[in-house]
Image: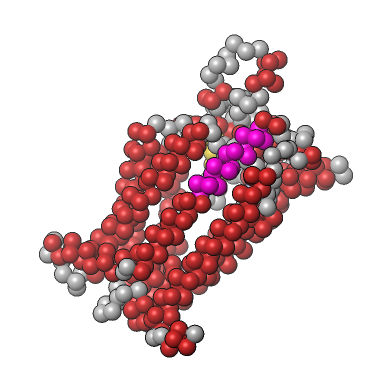
Amino acid sequence: METILNLPIENKIFYAVLVFSWTVYLWEAYLAYRQRRIYRLTVHVPQELGKIMDTDTFEKSRLYQLDKSNFSFWSGLYSETEGTLILLFGGIPFVWKVAGTVTARFGLGPEYEIFQSLSFLILATLFSAFTGLPWSIYNTFVIEEKHGFNQQSLGFFLKDAVKKFIVTQCILLPVTSLLLYIIKIGGDFFFIYAWLFTLGVSLVLVTIYADYIAPLFDKFTPLPEGELKEEIESMSKSISFPLTKVYVVEGSKRSSHSNAYFYGFFKNKRIVLFDTLLEDYSPLNKDGETDTPTEDKSKLKNKKQGCNNPEVLAVLGHELGHWKLGHTVKNIVISQMNSFLCFFLFAVLIGRKELFVAFGFYNSQPTLIGLMIIFQFIFSPYNEVLSFCLTVLSRRFEFQADSFALGMGRASELYSALIKLNKDNLGFPVADWLFSMWHYSHPPLLERLRALGSTKQD
Ligand SMILES: [Zn+2]
């Protein structure tokens, strides 16, 4: 004990970061173990779920979630070990040095810290892309494939990964250079300018993302004129949602998981529906079912994917509830307050040389490294607490949005939509209370159904 107390402050910082990281890891591993035990032991549909899920779907979802959980055990163990080894063997100062050698090749000495920082960033993102790739390939082509979700070919997947890497660099590099520059010339109040800058960047990204970035990856087509579109428009009108366009995104190119969301500023909101959400659009419904009479649909219940129009409208009622109840704005305000606080604390801490020494930077204090150490390592306990609070808040918001849809008279459609979506996505309806409290951004299915059902009777 005495030896730990006598260590220099930089060693204490270093070991505190490592110990905290492993504590979080072990806590999460314990929670995942509890949840896995539920997957293993709950082999029969619990009585209260009898009307909601058939035995076959229940078993399928149980095996899917069990595979996913085992996978995340190994990938989690790998990344925790990798992170620890990087810290223990001085990986960060090593890559920083390599980045310096690279920039020196171009005749840019250490006085050009920005160039060294950029080449460090490229090297670091390349490293994480390459070490992450095998995991992500295994996840897509073994696990998702085995359970019938994967719709991608390996070629599509790799092209996508390269595109994603390039697009990320195109945003990350200029934004980081400007941020470093602002911190450098900002004087005593640089943290205010840095915060304003990141606020501006996030607003610009939100504005251009849907029109210029997302279409690089997926095909968006306007929802054709027709009953569904008219009903979406009239529903938006009824709650004064300033809808300008409805799109269908070809999510089926990637996976058969389904979703819906809205985006846009002020008076220019758009709604995006995954084709996999729409019974009539999902290409996954189209093969092999053409000559089957509709009466036989019950036999094919596991083939037919997506929701009918009233259910889609109920799902949208829930989504629009998030908007009407101010959840979107509240989330933005929280994240901006958090980012201001982080920049302020960063300004307080950046002058402390011992933070740099702790991570192997004995003679220099590069700003980029400071950002990394402080935001990622020093703030990690705070980040854990914050993310738990946000998860709790998110579940509250989900209940509120459900009850908004209920107020619009769409409770029974939402009820059946939730069941269908849970089935299409093979969600497992039984959860360990501690695991779900920590991880679930949405309340467990049964709780949502109960909330919808019990008020429905009133
Ligand atoms: Zn929601």
The quadrant of the rendering that contains the C terminus is top right
Q: Is residue 339 visible?
A: no
Residue 267, position as x, y percentages in the image: 55, 48
Q: Is residue 126 located in the magenta-colored stretch of the structure? A: no
> Where is residue 445 drawn, in percent x and y?
70, 44
**Rendered residue at 48%/54% (across/down):** 76
Q: Splitting the image into 4 quarters, where does residue 377 fall?
A: bottom left
Residue at 74% of width from left, 48% of height from top? 447
What residue is rendered at 53% in x and 31% in y? 148
Kindly give the residue lying farthest to the right in the view shown.
Answer: 458
Indicate whether 254 appears above or below 13.
Answer: above
In depth, the one of 225 and 359 nearer the eye is 359
Residue 293 position in % (x across, y down): 66, 12
Identify which residue, 328 or 258, lies in the foreground.
258
Residue 194: give x, y in percent of width and height: 40, 69
- The residue under the point 27% across, 77% down is 364
Q: Which secondary structure class fits the magenta region best? A: helix
Q: Is residue 287 left or right of residue 350?
A: right
Please provide the residue range marked out in magenta: 57-72
Q: Is residue 62 magenta?
A: yes
Q: Is residue 11 left or right of residue 280?
A: left
Question: Does residue 352 lie above or below 92 as drawn?
Answer: below
- Viewer-nearest residue: 282 or 423: 423
Count of picture labels:
0
Which residue is nearer to you in this view: 91 or 394?
91
Above or below, 235 relative to 362: above
| Left or right of 110 in this view: 383 | right
